[in-house]
Image (spheres, rainbow, N blue to C red):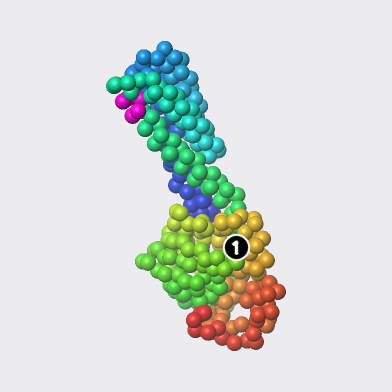
Amino acid sequence: MSRVDTVLLPELDGPVPATLPRALGLLSLALGVGALAAPGPVARMTGVDDSPAARSVLPAIGLRELGSAAGLLSGRRPAGWAWSRVAGDAMDLAVLGRALADRAGDRRRRVALTTLAIAGITAVDVLAAVRTGRARRARARVIQMEIAVTVNRSPAEAYRFWRDMENLPRFMAHLESVRADDLRRSHWIARGPAGHRVEWDAEIIDDQPNKSITWRSLPGSRVPNAGRVRFVPAPGDRGTEVRVELRYAPPAGALGRAVAKLFGEEPEQQVRDDLRRFKQVLETGEVVRSEGSPNGISVRQQAMQRPAQPLPPSRR
């Protein structure tokens, strides 16, 4: 599953943990060095050069910034360090607010500009803290699985059917539709637990004709996911072994999975059923319901089953 891991984890981390906290760490480093190495010029630039207290306050702020820089650049607990910056920003804004009230003229203008700059940095710090925390929680609830089915078709036939993304709702029961925007990107609409609809955009990031397809959701998806399907010739010329590797983070974590099980939508069982339907579609051209292969695992779903018959065209 190494290929899937390298695709999914950056998406769950999002671009933020890899870039924004590091940028904030470099900013903290620059601010810290400036406050310690040149407190006089920094005091003049910020408009507090008339305050004797600034000579002791600025070095303290510099040490705080260097501590934040070390934490953010280390890559450990980025959300915690980002929130520590937010706390520091709040203290800086409080000090600047008092300084603004006590000054006039050019110094007041410089303090006001500094306050605006710190307010902007605070907004970025809050964004980084929120998004990195969200990514950490997403990683904690990742579900992963690997399931296979053997179909009596060649790898080329199986690949060709799956590669047409708009075919996926024909055998994936939870999908309402997949719209191919171009050769790489597509828009997915799925039915979630309790009838909720979930939409996301995805892209194919590795396409090896007749061998494998690897995809991932685009940043901002409510259900970050990635996976790979491989088409391997089955031993003894028995068709093709279709192997699906999948990792995703459901929006409601463990509670969401428990609710899904209650509705007969346990993720691994759902994928297993999807692959069984894929086999039926590829080998017979249609999905057949039967009392021996219920559409789901809950009592409610089994009670709704009808005798064996093809699905109506609208559900294929």
Q: Is residue 243 above or below residue 140?
A: below
**Residue identifier under label 1:** 146
Q: For this rendering, which residue is in front, 91 or 219? A: 91
Q: Residue at x 49, y 81 (%)?
A: 314
Q: Residue at x 60, y 49 (%)?
A: 140
Indicate the quadrant containing the N terminus: top left, top right, bottom left or bottom right. Answer: bottom right
Q: Residue at x 40, y 69 (%)?
A: 180
Majority SS type along the magenta span: helix
Helix, strand, or loop for circle 1? strand
Q: Residue furthest right?
A: 299
Q: Is residue 47 above or below residue 203?
A: above
The amino acid pointed to by label 1 is Glu
Residue 267 is inside the magenta segment = no
Q: Residues within 10 Å of mark 1 (few under 14, many from 20)?
A: some
Q: For this rendering, which residue is in front, 280 or 186? A: 186
Using residue 18 as the reference point, say whether residue 293 is left or right of it.
right
Using residue 176 as the reference point, say whether residue 261 is left or right of it.
right
Residue 91 place in picture, x, y as percent: 48, 27
Using residue 66 as the reference point, say whether residue 260 is left or right of it.
right
Q: Residue at x 44, y 73 (%)?
A: 166
Residue 126 place in picture, x, y as percent: 47, 40
Q: For this rendering, which residue is in front, 66 or 196? A: 196
In this rendering, does residue 211 appear at all?
Answer: no
Q: How many marks?
A: 1
Q: Residue furthest top?
A: 52
Q: Residue furthest left?
A: 106
Residue 286 place in picture, x, y as percent: 53, 83
In this rendering, does residue 50 appear at all?
Answer: yes
- Dividing the picture into quarters, in which one does residue 103 lie? top left
Magenta part of the chain = 109-113
